[in-house]
Amino acid sequence: MTEVLTPEAVTSGVDGLALVGASERPPESKLGRTGFFTTAIGARQEKYLSEHGDQLRAYLLARLRDVQRATDAFEDVTSWLSRQKKSTLEEAPSIQAAYFAAARRFFRAQIEAGHAAGAIDDVPWEAVPPGSPEGYGAVLDVVRHGLGEEELELLELRYARRLKVDELSYVLERPVDELMIRLESAMGFARLLISEVRHAKPPTLAHVLHDAFQVVPHSLREAFKDRRRVPPKLAPETRIGERFEIVECVGGGAFAWVYRARDVRVPGHQVALKVLHRPARTEPAREGAIRELSVIASAFHPSLVQLKEHGWHQDRLWFVMPWYRGETLGERLAREPLAVAEAAPLFASLSRALSALHAAGVVHRDVKPDNVFLAQLESEGNSDEVLPIVLDLGVAAPEGDLALAGTPVYFAPEMARRIVDENADVGVSSKADVFALALTFVHAVTGGPDLSNLSLESFVAMRAKSAPTLPKIAGLGALEPVLRRALAVDAADRPTASELALTFAQLGAGTKPRTRMPRPGGRFAWALALLACGAAGYFAWGWRADHQASLLRHARDTSLRRELERQQLRAEALEASLRSALDRNVEGETAGTEVAVEPQSSITSSSLRVEPRGTSTR
């Protein structure tokens, strides 16, 4: 069982079950909200940080001696630990030891990458405690300046951070016997230094060592709060990546701003450009973002939302996506359900898109009507052709990733079991996407269930034990038994996304995918904005909207092969970028330092819609 912990506020939770990092545009019910989930152990981690986070921040500040770098490291540590297995915490003597061990790996990675620590006097040390004897400040200074780095760290962890011997052994990766010898030696040297301060009558050595490593309590806390504040919107005409010029901000929320921008290299070409709020100032944070991009770069399908370009602006990740016209499937269903024959071709395309994602080893984890965009294509005078696109890859993850994320209504039973039972030994695979897509289809043709009387906790507990019953739907034919399998409680009984696509295609053969889109004058312009997680989300590579219509009509001709070759070149370029970033840490890795960096899971946002001028943005 894995518990997910993020710096975001918990938006709901009873008996250890919580939803964090909810979407920017939340539906009325929490059951329909995208988020990351935590259980009792995750709640205990949250409680630990709220009570002892200052000690962890102070340790990082005392070691790095730079407020901004210590703040970056603290955020990286909490993000990385939020995605670890339960066993990662259980193998440590205590939660405190697990956090300090992770913090030590992160700050050592910065030092070994060539980012030297600042000066000892750059640390905002706490003032001398009131009532201290004369000369006590000089005693504290001589301890800070006279000890070596290893001795400083050892004595700080033991006396200022209050780690027990077994915790020290785990954090410093030293045997207890050796550690005790080092500790005695460091204490002896500290006594010698103190004895040289004339006229000073300090209290016990333990008191001196405790006071010597105290920092101003609010110094890092305030810096962390400043980092979490939403940055101002970029002004029109701002250039991003020397290619994209901001036209206007079209939406945003707690995690990112989304803009309509023009491509200065292609006259008349507009794009959706998203800039994350959270900066990534450290090399591990940027490496994590690049690693995630490389995971999904190999997945391509016209019905997968695509990334055109990406880069960094003021240490914040930005990425560009196509700008389409249309609406989400959720909005379409708010007017009326789809006919089975109308929905089948759309879901055949969606199934193939998920199959491509799964073939790349990635699980979407949040398939639902609001994450399916019905892009209205205009080609050869036909404005009714619709391309369904899978949106919001922000909580997508490599298959086998243990973080729990998604929307409760569309949870597969195995996901719900992992949430309600921390000891449940069940995996979450691509079959969870198959379950969610099948349920999305059922809701698309029936209008969906009434969940207004269910709480988040009771619903997840119910889904953990049973799957929804397939209602009687006219016109399913051969699709009915496949849907029943897709909604099975046991993931092993479900078909693959590819098998589901074949059945949808057979049902929809000869049916043109139309969804009665709004006519000109009532259309909505949409920016297809990805969800992004950690120091950034999971992304796919670019595809122009006008070319996607051609791909659907000419999927077998040579133009597709040429475009796929270009996609492969882009993927190889990204992989080269990742290798280059990782090579800078080779020396540190060969020295035996283990640095594990994961993205911040909480960086998420929902797809954002842009209303016609004169109306508000939802």
Image (cartoon, grey):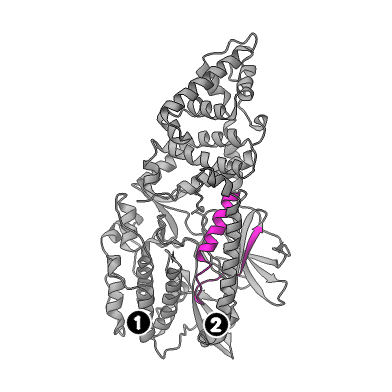
- Contact (Cβ within 8 Å) of mark 1 with mark 2: no
Q: Name the residue under label 2.
A: 560
- Alpha carbon separation for disc pair 1 and 2: 24 Å
Q: For the view shown, which residue lies furthest in the front direction?
A: 590
| Image quadrant where residue 476 sits | bottom left
What quarter of the picture does the C terminus occupy? Answer: bottom right
Q: Residue at position x 70%, y 77% from top?
A: 268
Q: In this view, does 161 lie above or below 244?
A: above
Relative image position of residue 107 (x, y in whole percent): 56, 40
Please, what secondary structure does the residue beneath circle 2 have? helix
Magenta stretch containing residue 285, yes or no?
Answer: yes
Q: Mark 1 points at which residue?
A: 503
- Segment tinted magenta in the rendering: 283-312
Relative image position of residue 357 (x, y in whole percent): 45, 70
* Left or right, 562 with reference to 158: right
Frontmost residue, 260 versus 502:
502
Magenta stretch containing residue 36, yes or no?
Answer: no
Q: Which amino acid does label 2 sit on?
A: Leu
* Left or right, 101 with reference to 443: right
Please, what secondary structure does the residue beneath circle 1 have? helix
Crowd tier of the residue under label 2, counting other residues whose Cα lies within 10 Å: few below 14, some 14–19, many 20 or above: some
Q: Is residue 535 above or below residue 247?
A: above
Relative image position of residue 115 (x, y in whole percent): 64, 42
